[in-house]
Structure formats: structure tokens, C-alpha cells
Image: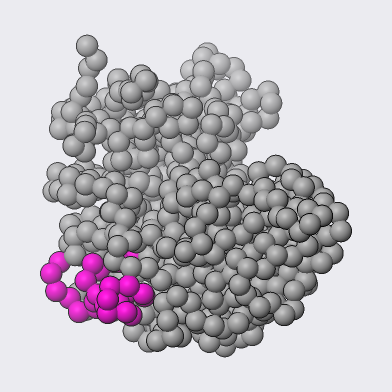
Amino acid sequence: MKKMRTLAAAFAVAALAASAPAILAQSDAAAKDENTKRETNTIRVDIAPGHQTNSFAPDRALGAGIDRLPYGATDKLYTDTMIKQVLASGWMPVSYRQNTELHVEAWHWNPEGTWSDPSGKGYFTGNAAPGELIRHSYGYALPHRGVTRNDGTETEGYSRLTDGDLDSYWKSNPYLTKAFTGEDDSLHPQWVMLDLATPQSVDAIRIAWADPYARRYLVQYWTGLQDPIKFPTKGVWQTFPSGAVSDGRGGEATIRLADAPGLVQFVRVWMTESSNTCDSHGDADRRNCVGYAIREIYAGTLGARGEFHDVVQHVKDQEQAATICSSVDPWHSAADLNEKAGDQSGLDLFYTSGVTRGLPAMIPIAMVYDTPQNAAAEISYVEKRGYPISYVEMGEEADGQYMLPEDYGALYLQFAAALHRVDPKLKLGGPVFQGVNKDIEVWPDAEGRTSWLGRFLDYLKSHGRLADLAFFSFEHYPVEPCKVTWSTLYDEASLVTNILHVWRSDGLPAGVPAFITESNIAWETSESFVGIYGALWLADYVGAYISAGGDAVYYFHYFPMGIHPGCNRSPGTFGMFTVDANYNALQFTSQYFASQLLTQEWVVPGDAAHLTYPAVSDVVDAAGHVLVTSYAVLRPGGEWAILAINKDQENSHAVRIAFQGDAAGGESYFDGDVNVVTFGAAQYQWHPEIKGGWAEPDGPAARETVRAGRETRFVLPKASVSVIRGRIAVAER
């Protein structure tokens, strides 16, 4: 029978074990006896004046995120017991994640509100007047959706462009038209892209237009061999020989695109002038009468007698010929409620439960699939309740929704104006990029520019509105699912450091803080999340990003979400606990212990400034991998803390810690009592099984107080995270 320790019992064991020796401090002679090579192993900390790399306060820099919760889970998770358990991890500020946008839904942050059409349809605005406390909120599927699947929604819903139903239609976002941007529609071309799955013979297209239809548009094919969304610079959108239309009349338009069929997989319709005729919802609301709408799209060949041979699969599910679109009209109805997709915690529940610790929280507004009026009402509601806001994220993963940066920029400025009318002091930011390790590229503009962030920043600058970007946010999921190996752990420090440099190179101003507002190993879980790998990765990631000058990180996910089969059916979880069917916590996972080392041992909890300095080790393997990474913090009060991660699975390493470049020009070292806290393979081991698994041992971290001097060497056990903390003294010369 498996030994499953409850969390209550684990807390008791932790108290008893707090003084158990976990790490040995060795003299130089002892180190020679154990391993001659180890006597040269050194962590060198550069403390020369002016060499600090960052200054941060834990209460603002080390946080966690709460996302949409499974349907029915909210009331089981927002309990006093669970709140105490998640707070014990030590994470401080909270980031509220906005998931409805990933599912192409409008967010009713307040279930009570008004519709633009009083019959219960149109554009919804939540009630800004506080009333009954909001405990639950949900998304509403958009009936004019034009995307089959994107980087947020892989299995739910379908596009109306290839659903085989002429009574449904895709429609673009009206807020991207001149009536709202003040700019000519040609500056915000709207588009739909058809993926035929494999190269097909195409010389014709048939478009069943709805109102408003495109008067001017291009029909194009992709010349590259790879996906134009994933590899936007590996090909060119080429207009078919007869693919330019300048006098579109709507209705059902059949166009012979070329004299002879050619093999193409990706077809794009690029629209730049609208008829501005009203859609099926009537002319009472001008939003119904701008943009573009298509009922169905077909592609294939025309026979000698004009018969159309369609190669497109038209069905109402994920088997349809996949389409992607530039934007979606947020029009919907009360009947589009999608509770089963999950519960966005009610804002009142979020703020009053205790999970925010009373600190200002980062909250989102829905922007990609919503209206400025609804966003402004949300912020007005929160402020009327007196809830503190640190930052407001504008939309969610615009890159994963395949928006062009100028379109996101146009929405950003409209929503920013609406929000600042509510409160001019609000700090707004985004674009909440997905977890990437390199620059995000898009199809080149007229000037050949392909950097998403660079073009977004240029859009703000060209409108004199760069000041509306008070912070920059992105997510960090560095490893592709199913590709997590121990060797990927060696890359983390360089990956997270480099991506920060990429954003600055794209033009992100030095004065704009950069936040990682959601993060974990990969965007699909596996055993690596709950094994010791997860602890080492988390410590290395946080240490590297903060030391490189990053302004804040938010761990994902604060609440437990249960063990899931994950990648290759390898069970794991986003979170710090295993839970039963009712979301009662059973055990800590490895990332819980790593969280505590980061938030309660490496730093002093609170709002006092901590300074980071460069720290490097010379512990490498034969392949040149750095086996010991280290991050140095000067804590308030003058104490130094070294976060050291030993990534060697087989061997411990005894290291000397040298502080170099002090004011006197010499070398300093730990002197006197030094506190050492270690969590590693000796304290934790995950035992997988097909339906989940369990940890035994499952902590706690081991602790020791060491009397240190110049020659002291600290043993870093195999596969471990250690915090070595004390004061330093100048060595005799």
C-alpha cells in the first residue's frame, strides 16, 4: 500500500525536521579527500561597485497566477483551508489570467448587465454598479467565429467559414474599422486564410458573401513549403493572376484565379475596402454595418463548362477545412453561454477570499473579443468596490490569436482611452505573448518589417501613445511538450535571459518594466512538473530572470488543478499539490518546496529592496554544460543569499563561494554562522503510475547552520536547490 502523507501531517514533520542536517560545510582538506577536482570548484560573485544587475522587492516581483478553473471547482478551491495552503508557498502578488479569449469567447465578468439589443443579444456591457458579490463568471462563444483552432483553442468550436451552413457567417471586428480607429480601412486589412491540409489543385474560388462584403480584395496563395502562421517569413503571399478584385458586388462570387490549376495548400483573402452594408442584425447599431462578413468559402477548380469542383471539407466540427481569420466580431447572445469551458473566478470572490493577501493584484480586461465599454465597466466596478489594482493586462495572447500587431495596437488605444477615462492613473500593458524563446515574427509589412513587438511599439509611437504602455507582459513556457529531457534543464538560464534581451532589442524602452505573468516548464504537463526536475527548473528560471533585470515573475498555477495524463500520457500537474476528486490537497509537489526556497529563504518577504549581482560557477561537465548555476542577492540588512542549483543527477559538488571586487579591491567570503537550506533528490522522489503517482519522500527541505570561513566549501547534493545565506568578511591579504 502506497504511503500517502497528508498535508497536515507534512507540516508537522517539517517542524520536527527543521534542524536536520542536510548539507556539509567542509574544510579545504576534507574536500581534497573526497574529490580532488572539487577543491577548484568555485562560485564567484561579482560585487564590484556599480555591477549590480537588478533591484527588486519580493512583494511586487515574486507572484503567482490564477486561471480559469474547471467547471464546478471554484467553490471547492476557494476555501480557507486551501487558501492557507497556497499562501504557505510564499508567492506574493497575484495575476488573474483571462482565459475566455483563448476560446474565442466574450467574457461576462459580471453576469448582470445590458445588451445593445434588449432582446438579449448584441454587445454586452457588465453592470458597473456593485450589487450582489460576484462569485462566478463565464465566457460566451462567438457565433461569428472564423477560426477553426488557434494556439488557445485546439478542440472546441469551429469556424463558420467552412461549416456548410449558409445561414451562419464569419464577421470581422467592427472596432478595426475607420468608424472606430479613425484610420482608413486599408491600414487595417482583414483577412481569412484557408488551409487545405495538403497541396490541392486550385484555379478558382467561390465566396458566399454576407453583409458587409468586401468591395476591394485580393485572393492569394502561399509560396512557402511550411505553415504561413508558424513560419511567416519562409514564403510569400502571391496574388493569383486573376485574384485582384476592385469592384466586389457581394452575393456568391465565383472567380477563376488562373488559366490552369496549380498545387496550393494555403489560400488567403485579403480585404481592404468594405461595402459598409448592414449584417443580419439590422441597422440600429453601426457596429453591424462595418467590416467584412463571409457565409462560406470554397476553393478548387472550374471545369470546361463552368462547373465548380470544391476540395474544401464543410462540416461543423474540427474535421472541417481549417480556417484562420484576422479578427472576430464580439456580437453574441444569451444563448451562447459556455459554462462547461470553465469558471473565471468572480472578481469579488477573487479579492475577498484572501488569496491576494490584500496586495494590489494584476487583473485583465478582455480586449481581443470584447468592447471598450465592457472593459471600462469592469474597472469601474473594481474601483467602486475599493479593490486595489496594480496593473491591467490588455487582452490575452494576441499572438496566439494570430492578430497582426497594428490591429492589436488599434484596439489597445481604443480600450486604453476608455479605461483612462475611468481612472487616468491605471497602469496598462500587454500584449501577453505566449511562451516563446525567440522573437515573434509576422508577415512583412510594406516596409519589410517582421517583428511583432517592434511593429506594435512603432504603432503606439506613431500615434503619440507610447506612454499608454506602462508595462510589457509575456508568458514563459520554454520547452515544447513531449520534448522535456534532463538536458533541456541546462538551457533554461540562457533561454529566459535571452528572451528579455530580444524584447529590448525590438525597441521595448528601458523604463518599461517587463513581467512574466504566467510560467511553467511547458504548455502541456508531464511527470517533469512533479518530479525533482520541476523544482530545479523553477528555481533556475526565477533566479535567472530576476538576476537578468526582469521585473516580476508569476508562477502558474496557484491553485491545484489535479493530476492529468499530460504529454505522452505522462501524468503531471500545473501546481504545487496533488488533490483528490474534490480538490482536497493530498501532498506537496516539488515546485511547492522550490517556491518556499525562493520566496522565504533566498529573499526576505516584504517590500524592501533586494539587489542582485552576477554569480558564475566553474562546475561544468565534459560537454560544457554548466552543472551549477547560481544567483546572488544582497538582502536588506546586509545579509547575502546564494541560490545554487546543482543539475548533476549523479554527483554532489563541493563549492567554495568567493565574493570578488569589493570596495577594497579584494576577495570576500562567508564568515560566521551561515544558514543552508537544501531541497533535492534526497528529500523528494516522485513515483509515477498510470493514473497519477505520489511522492515519497515528500520533503521537507533540510536545514543546517554552518560556521564558515575563507576556505569553507559547501556540498551541493545531486539534483538539488540550495540557499546559502550569511554575512561576508574581507579576506586577509
477 or 176, which is in the foreground? 176
Q: Is residue 339 left or right of residue 289?
A: left
Residue at x-position 59% and y-position 69%? 209
Q: Is residue 289 left or right of residue 531?
A: right
676 or 243, which is in the foreground? 243
Vertical placement of residue 488 versus 215, above or below: above
Q: Which residues are magenta?
A: 107-133
In the rendered image, the residue lying farthest to the right is 259
In the rendered image, the residue lying farthest to the top is 1
Percent position of residue 303, x then y: 78, 53
Q: Can residue 35 be found in the magenta stretch?
A: no
Residue at x-position 86% and y-position 58%? 259
User: Could you say which quadrant of the image residue 280 lies in?
Assistant: bottom left
Residue 374 visible here: yes
Vertical placement of residue 517 versus 543, above or below: below
Residue at x-position 47% and y-position 31%? 567
Percent position of residue 291, x then y: 55, 77
| Labels in figure, total | 0
Q: Can residue 125 be found in the magenta stretch?
A: yes
